[in-house]
Structures are given as structure tokens and as C-alpha cells.
Image (cartoon, grey):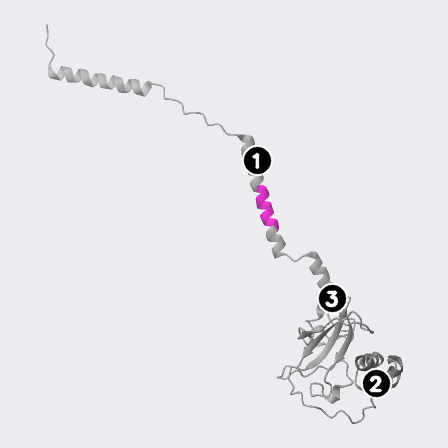
Amino acid sequence: MRHSTPFGLLGIAIAALAISACNLAMAPKPKPAPTYVNIRLAESQLATKQRQLADNQARIDAMTQPSTTEITQTENLPTTNPRGIPVAHAMPWKGMPATLIGSTYLGEPDETGDVIDGGLLDGGTPYYWHSRNEKRERVFEAVMRDGEVIDVSRWNQGANYWPESTSLNADALPILDASGARNDVSSGAPDLPDPNDYDNPDDYEADAEDYFTWLGCDDPAQAAYLYWESIAG
């Protein structure tokens, strides 16, 4: 009987390890656990995300693009006064849309008066522009009603805001930063009747119209009527 040597035992061990390794390599590998996907749920989530993105884009477009209404209103506004002067270089005029109140030569009004109660301008709201000196005197007035200017008036025409040479010029621009010193405008002026001597504005209008024509009013008869209302009405 032959005895095993250490080298023989080592060879047997190596062979056994090799066979074990081979068996492990040849053994079938375990299959990964199957992954289940809910297709309907995924599609629903995707559709919801797409709607959110579309809504966000619509909000961005609404904030960055002017509305059709604003464009239409702007296109319909006049760019000049009735005598062809660009709005930015013109004074407010009768019939001017109220939207342009701050767009004329005078800029934004400095003061808003109370709504007028009674008379030709009943229901109108007066807006005033002041001088740019320390006096801050009223220089011009425009009365608004139903979305348009229905009356305009120059204030302090006896001061140097309105040089005498421009008194008959409806498009004359005031000198807003003038001192407010009084001008001598009495020479050549028709007499201005006292409103308190008249019982009604119609009679006063007939006698005072010449004065308000000389003063340069756009509508002298109406100016005389309103003057009677403010003094004796």
C-alpha cells in the first residue's frame, strides 16, 4: 500500500478547489426581481406636468405682452390738437380725451378740484396746473366730464405767466417759471361789466362777450356765462 505524500495531498486539494470554482461559474445566476411600472400613472403624471408648464408659459406671455385693449386705446388717441400741434407741445383743449390729461405741454395736473354742482359744467371735475415759482399760483384749468375735456380756462392772465402779446393766441404756452409779476393789460381792453348788475347769465353774456373775446378765450360767450355764475350765480 502506497502512502500519500504532502505534495499528493496538496494536489488533491487544489483540484478540489478548481472543481468547486468551476461548479460555481457554471451554476445558473439568480434572476433579478422583476420591476413593475404603472404605465397609466406615469402618463397621468407626465400630462399634469405638461399642463403646469403650459400654464406657467401663459402667465409669462400675459405679463410681457401688451393687451389688445391697451393697443386699441392707444391707437385711437389723437397725436395732435385740432390745429395740428403735437399733443406734447399743446395745451389741453375742449374735446381732448381725458386719457391725455398728463400728456400735454403742462404735464400732470397739480390739483384736482371738487365736482361742479350746477350750471353749464355740472358734473365736471376741474384740474389745475400751477406756476413753478414759490407762489404756486393757478395758471390753467381743464374741466373733465364723461371722459373728455369740456372747458378750459387761463388763470392769472394779468401776471407775466401770460405775456400780453399772446393773449389772443389760443395756442400760447404759459411761462410756468415766471415771477408772477403783474402785467399792464388794461390798455385797449373792453370794459368788463359787473356780474352783480345782471339778473341772469344770458344778459351778462351778451354784454361781456367782447371782453372775453379780447382776453383770448376759445369760447367767449361761454366764458362770460361761467364768469357770471362764479360771481353772481
Q: Are marks 2 and 1 in contact (CB under 8 Å)?
A: no
For label 2, the SS is helix
Secondary structure mostly seen in magenta is: helix
Q: Residues within 10 Å of mark 1 (few under 14, many from 20)?
A: few
Residue under label 1: 44
Residue 116 vs residue 150, the one in the foreground: 116
Mark 2 crowdedness (10 Å alpha carbons): few <14, some 14-19, many ≥20: few
Please determine whether, in this image, residue 55 is positioned above or below residue 98. Answer: above
Disc 2 to disc 1, how far (Cα)? 84 Å
Task: Report x, y in % for residue 185.
Answer: 76, 91
**Which is more N-terminal, label 2 or label 3?**
3
Between discs 2 and 1, the one toward the N terminus = 1
Question: Residue at coordinates 13% horizontally, 17% vertically from top-left?
Answer: 7
Dividing the picture into quadrants, the one containing residue 207 is: bottom right
- Label 3 or label 2, whichever lies nearer to me, is 2
Near mark 3 (Cα within 10 A), the count class, few <14, some 14-19 or many ≥20, is: few
Return the disc, 3 or 1, that comes first in the chain's sequence.
1
Relative side of 199 to 108, left or right = right
Residue at x 31%, y 21% (from the top left corner): 25
> Which residue in the protein does label 2 denote?
196
Q: Which residues are magenta?
A: 50-58
Q: Mark 1: which amino acid?
A: Ser
